[in-house]
């Protein structure tokens, strides 16, 4: 068992790093870096192959409002649309991790703030 002061420090550090946000908050931060988001650009980006074999919709399907499966691993993927998955895009660190991994899979690079803003703005319109 850890000494009490270390446990307390760990718990306090964990508490300080957790921050709940809304998809709207996250969108505002991306727009602050890039400019006004476009849901139509976001939908197009989501569905187009970007030089690799996959598009975002290869695994998440369109509309991304239901469980799907990863095309290689078969792992279940929860819906991306916040309307179908209320916890989606409510943790900035998870959202950034998700964008980094998936953009690298689809684009062979990280997404720009504009691409993130566009995709997120479109996902927020999906019912």
Image (cartoon, rainbow, N blue to C red):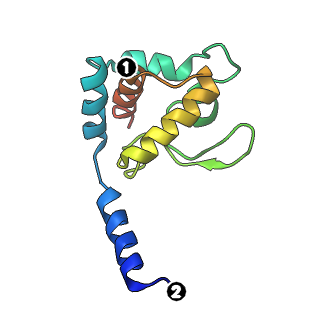
The one of 12 and 26 positioned closer to us in this rendering: 12
Q: Return the x and y of residue 62 as percentages of the image width and height.
A: 53, 30
Q: Residue under circle 1?
A: 114
The one of 87 and 101 positioned closer to us in this rendering: 101
SS at circle 2: loop
The image quadrant that residue 8 belongs to is: bottom left
Mark 1 crowd level (few <14, some 14–19, many ≥20, 10 Å Cα): many
How many marks overall? 2
The numbered disc on residue 88 is: none
Q: Residue under circle 2?
A: 1
SS at circle 1: helix
Q: Residue 55: tell me if it is visible.
A: yes
Of the numbered discs 1 and 2, the one sitting upstream in the chain is 2
**87 to the left or right of 28:** right
The image quadrant that residue 13 belongs to is: bottom left
Q: Return the x and y of residue 123 as percentages of the image width and height.
A: 40, 32
Q: Return the x and y of residue 84 as percentages of the image width and height.
A: 42, 46
Q: Residue 80: tell me if it is visible.
A: no
Residue 4 sits above or below residue 33 on the image: below
**91 to the left or right of 62:** left
Mark 2 crowd level (few <14, some 14–19, many ≥20, 10 Å Cα): few
Q: The C terminus is located in which quarter?
A: top left
């Amino acid at each position: 068992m850890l000494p009490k002061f270390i446990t307390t420090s760990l718990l306090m550090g964990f508490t300080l790093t957790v921050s709940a946000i809304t998809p709207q908050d996250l969108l505002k931060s991306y727009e602050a870096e890039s400019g006004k988001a476009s849901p139509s650009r976001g939908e197009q980006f989501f569905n187009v192959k970007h030089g690799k074999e996959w598009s975002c919709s290869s695994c998440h399907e369109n509309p991304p409002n239901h469980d799907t499966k990863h095309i290689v691993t078969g792992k279940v993927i929860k819906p991306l649309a916040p309307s179908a998955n209320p916890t989606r895009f409510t943790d900035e660190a998870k959202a950034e991790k998700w964008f980094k991994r998936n953009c690298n899979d689809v684009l062979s690079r990280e997404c720009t703030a504009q691409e993130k803003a566009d995709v997120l703005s479109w996902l927020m319109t999906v019912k």
